[in-house]
Image (spheres, grey):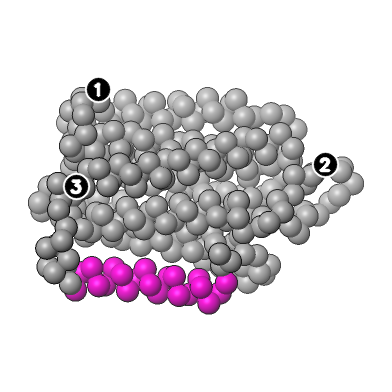
Amino acid sequence: MKITEGRFILFSILAIVLLMVMHVFQAQIAVFYNPANYVGFHMLLESFSIATSAAILLYGLKSYEKNQSSRMLLLSFTFFIVGTLDLLHTLSFKGMPYFFTESSVAKATWFWVSARFFQSLLILATLFIPERKLSRDYRPLAILAGTTIAITVGILIIYYEKTLPILMVEGKGTTLLKNGIEYGISFILFVSLIRTLYQYHLEKSEATLSLALAFVYLLLTELVFTIYQSVFDLDNFLGHIFKSLGFFFILKSLYFSNRKITEEVYEEEEKDEEDPKMMNWI
């Protein structure tokens, strides 16, 4: 399905309407919603996001052989970290089996905000850094750095969970610190959205518009995660749906918006400008 300006507006409005409907008719919807099923649905939704991160990582590492793109390398590095932290978030979610320590709300929530922080900040960096052809193969270094960051964050959260500030009180909602972190991430995503829409205004690329739609859903995700009362409630469920949609449109912007992705970019030394078929955000 081609993403047009009309569909971008329509999908954005539908997401906002869905959020409003969920709150206005929450009592009625709750009759059909069984929280006991949520751990399974959560695992399915997160598995999709993790698989998407893995696909972007592998695509980036493979395409780097041809283009040696600095942005593609950073994008691969980003989704290696994000996918790993999302995996730890999923394994640590309350109700999941024992994983180094007992699964808990605190662990899962800290892994969530860590993944979203790296995701938003590094994607923003990808949008703003100048594109250039790197002279060396930095993929092993990127994987090593990503592994180091993921292991460090994992150790800090898993083994020092009790000393970390409280982000979520089950049944009562998110803390001021949690909301502050989420609003900070939301601001970064909003800047990324504005940057992407400006890029679309200049170049009218479907890939860029698809990426902008991803930022809309990811921004709504962060806002939803400031209002939920329980990790098993409808708001948490809706937030994970928005996140999955956001990841889908990032994947779409990479693979599907351009029928012909140029692999020969930078191949000819005398070619100074980027092939117009190449996705303009990587």
Work out how far the residue at label 1 is from the one at label 3, CA to CA, in angstroms. Answer: 24 Å
- The amino acid marked with disc number 1 is Phe
Q: Categorize mark 3 by other alpha carbons within 10 Å: few (<14), some (14-19), many (20+).
A: few
- Seen in the picture, residue 219 relative to 100 is either above or below; the reply is below
Could you tell me which residue is drawn at 49 percent across and 31 percent down? 146
- The amino acid marked with disc number 3 is Asn
**Helix, strand or loop for disc 2:** loop
Asked if the residue at tag 3 contacts the one at tag 1, i.e. Cβ–Cβ closer than 8 Å, the answer is no
Answer left or right for 276 relative to 166. Answer: right
Asked whether residue 88 is in view, the answer is yes
Could you tell me which residue is drawn at 74 percent across and 49 percent down? 262
Residue 7 in picture, x, y percent from top left:
51, 73
Asked whether 8 falls inside the magenta stretch, the response is: yes
Residue 119 in picture, x, y percent from top left:
45, 46
Q: Categorize mark 1 by other alpha carbons within 10 Å: few (<14), some (14-19), many (20+).
A: few
**Among the 4 quarters of the image, the one containing residue 59:** top right
Q: Which label number is shown at residue 37? A: 3
Quarter placement of the N terminus: bottom right
In front: mark 1 or mark 3? 3
Asked whether residue 186 is in view, the answer is no
- The amino acid marked with disc number 2 is Glu
Could you tell me which residue is drawn at 59 percent across and 51 percent down? 254
Disc 1 target residue: 100
In front: mark 3 or mark 2? 3
Disc 2 target residue: 267
In depth, the one of 112 and 12 nearer the eye is 12
**Among the 4 quarters of the image, the one containing residue 5:** bottom right
**Helix, strand or loop for disc 1:** loop
Q: Which residues are magenta?
A: 4-24
**Helix, strand or loop for disc 3:** helix
- Seen in the picture, residue 165 relative to 207 is either above or below; the reply is above
